[in-house]
Image (spheres, rainbow, N blue to C red):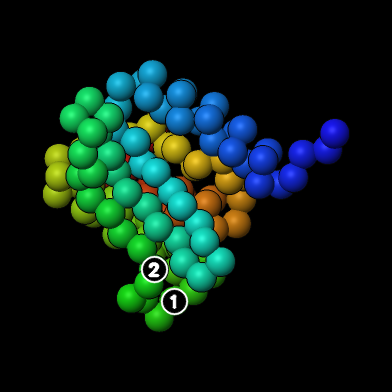
Amino acid sequence: MAQTTHQLRLARARRTHTKARISERPRLIVFRSNKAIYAQVMDDSTGKVLCGASDLKSKATGLKGAAEVGKTIAELAKKAKVKEVAFDRNGYKFHGKIKSLAEAAREAGLKF
């Protein structure tokens, strides 16, 4: 029986969640909706979100909006004294907005 795209994404998401939690570093979690892209840094040992960002208030959309979110989340993570994270792409393929966000976060100084 063929799986839907959503079912395949959820299966990939389970694998990436597990890998990220094993690393014992805070996770950079990415969620992409049809209208916006969201990112947050979460510490699994305490179960708390350290910082978060989205492109809802930004006028930039698409790849530019995702790059702004990546830059913003890296700056907020630095303020929260987080230098290294595990990238949890939530089952999304590493291209387009997800790739743009990751590259911008790396350029802003976040290591993963």
Compared with 69, 44 (above or below) is above
Q: Quadrant of the N terminus?
A: top right
Q: Are marks 1 and 2 in contact (CB under 8 Å)?
A: yes
Q: Nearer the viewer, residue 46 or 52?
A: 46
Q: Nearer the viewer, residue 81 or 3?
A: 3
- Callout 1 environment at 10 Å: few (<14), some (14 to 19), or many (20+)? some
Q: Quadrant of the C terminus?
A: top left
User: Looking at the rendering, which quadrant does residue 8 occupy?
Assistant: top right
Residue 68, labelled with which disc? none
Give the residue pinned by disc 1.
60
- Callout 2 environment at 10 Å: few (<14), some (14 to 19), or many (20+)? many
Q: Is residue 44 left or right of residue 17?
A: left
Across and down, in percent, residue 95 comes to 61, 50
> In the orientation shown, which residue stands out farthest toward the right?
1
Across and down, in percent, residue 75 comes to 23, 54
Give the residue pinned by disc 2.
55
Compared with 45, 90 (above or below) is below
For badge 2, the amino acid type reads: Asp
User: Looking at the rendering, which quadrant does residue 67 occupy?
Assistant: bottom left
Across and down, in percent, residue 94 comes to 59, 45
| 1 or 2: mark nearer the eye | 2
For badge 1, the amino acid type reads: Ala
- Residue 94 visible at all: no
Instruction: Count how many numbered circles sit on residues in the image.
Output: 2
- Residue 7 visible at all: yes
> In the orientation shown, which residue stands out farthest toward the bottom?
59
- Report helix, strand or loop for mark 2: loop
Instruction: Give how far apart the Cα atoms at labels 1 and 2 are.
Output: 7 Å
Across and down, in percent, residue 61 comes to 49, 74
Q: Nearer the viewer, residue 104 or 86?
A: 86
